[in-house]
Image: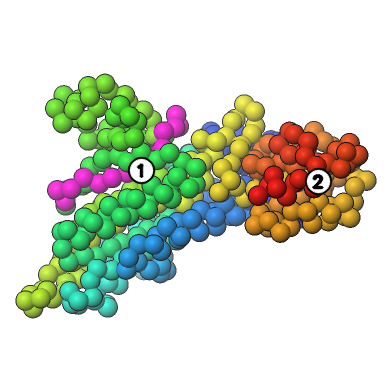
Amino acid sequence: MKQSQLFGSTRRDISKEEVSKNAILLTRGGYIDKEMAGVYTLLPLAFRMAEKIKNIIREELNKLPHTSEVLMPVMQPHQLWEATGRREIIKDVMYDIKDESVGLGPTHEEVATELFSHFYNSYKQMPVAIYQMQTKFRNEPRAKSGLLRGREFMMKDLYSFHLTDEDIADYYLQVKDAYMRIFARVGLNAIYTDASGGVFTKYRSHEFQVLAESGEDEIYLNQLGDRAWNKELVNENDPEFLQFCEGVIDKRSAIEVGNIFRFDNKYSAPLNAAVTNKSGERIDVLGASYGIGITRLIGTIAEVYGDIEKSKINWPKSVAPYKIHLIELGQDLGQDMYNEIVGAIHELPAASDILYDDRDESAGTKFADADLIGAPMRIIISSRTLERESVELNGGLVKLTDLKNKLT
Ligand code: ATP
Ligand code: MG
């Protein structure tokens, strides 16, 4: 992609309204544009990241048994929420449509459970799970954290339905493992965290928390730093808690990037999502839901990999909008040279992942922009490097003939 043809640009002067690190860096880098509080356009760079993250999520979730991707409606009837008793709870969060008993979906337990009931009525068809990646709407009172807390944001939500306790417990753990793979693949160290399960279940829920100073959550880490309890669950004198952390209390700020919880028959009972068991009895199915914030992930990765003082990001390769930033210095090189160099690397899987800075700008501007755009690999071509039949790759000279090997 030629940078001169990319929609949008980096920005030096950005609105003073932005206070969060991710929003500042992503706005400066030309990744996002704010429409209003908690509502952003994903410009081409952030859009590409979102697509890469979605593909990683898909690859991992499609490995789960009985699991399919769907797209449920954003518009939901209030009556479904009245049936489950959640209308009152959700009232302040759900954006309602004027003069209609309909609102925009903040989450989809009701719709998913009703959808299930349209197709399933026998134990023979169980278990089953559906997921979607969709824009969600929530009237968040504190939408000041950029992509971390949107009023309109992208979520991956998965709902599973089971006949037995063992089966739901087993699937839950499979999703946990898939989530850990997803977060590792996008470059985040997510900590599996016990959290409260709410009033309808005896089980705890689990969150995937990423340590970050800006995080709104507080978690208590164990000694190895690989498990945590959310503060909401902790009584510092609780023997179980003290055993968990071996008495060494390490309280940290973190960002919740994912959340999984069992709700069992909370929605299936009121929405008549029952199936017959082997003895012909009708049993309310057991359900669980599993969320990942796709746009929140972009914000979290920016918080972790960004540096405000240096105005710089260094994205993990798996999610960078472009893996390679090819920067041409001096306008004398021309299209032939570009073709030759790209020719040398065009057989690589990364070939479509090259952002080519062909703009007529100074070296200083190009480098400052490249710092903000944050591609993990930077190739500089100039008459100086070409005299030696080389390019500069992440700071070191590499012969054109060796470039291909270096990039594989
Ligand atoms: P939080 O506690 O941060 O408000 P939540 O517990 O309400 O989130 P869920 O309803 O479980 O979140 O949503 C699933 C996932 O969606 C969360 O783990 C988070 O990654 C993401 N998410 C939730 N709310 C937002 C939001 N306002 N903006 C961006 N992502 C969000
Ligand atoms: Mg939460």
Label 2 beta carbon less than 8 Å to ligand 1:
no
Is 245 above or below relative to 103? above
Quadrant, the N terminus: bottom right
Query: Which of the two marks, 2 or 1, is nearer to us in this view?
Result: 2
Rendering quarter of residue 160: bottom left
Reply yes or no: does residue 148 show up in magenta: no
Rendering quarter of residue 239: top left
| Mark 2, secondary structure of its residue | helix
In this picture, which residue range is highlighted in magenta? 201-214
- Disc 1 marks a residue whose amino acid type is Phe
Q: Residue at x 43, y 50 (%)?
A: 182
- Mark number displayed over residue 208: 1
- Disc 2 marks a residue whose amino acid type is Leu
The answer to which of 48 and 82 lies nearer the viewer is 48
Reply yes or no: does residue 206 show up in magenta: yes
| Mark 1, secondary structure of its residue | strand
Q: Residue at x 41, y 67 (%)?
A: 69
Q: Residue at x 26, y 21 (%)?
A: 248
The answer to which of 91 and 150 lies nearer the viewer is 150
The reply, left or right, for residue 235 in relation to residue 73 is: left
The reply, left or right, for residue 81 in relation to residue 136 is: left
The reply, left or right, for residue 154 in relation to residue 105 is: right
Rendered location of residue 173, percent (x, y): 27, 52
Rendering quarter of residue 91: bottom left
Label 1 beta carbon less than 8 Å to ligand 1:
yes
Q: Residue at x 30, y 39 (%)?
A: 193
Which residue has dot 2 on it? Answer: 400
The residue at the far top in this view is 248
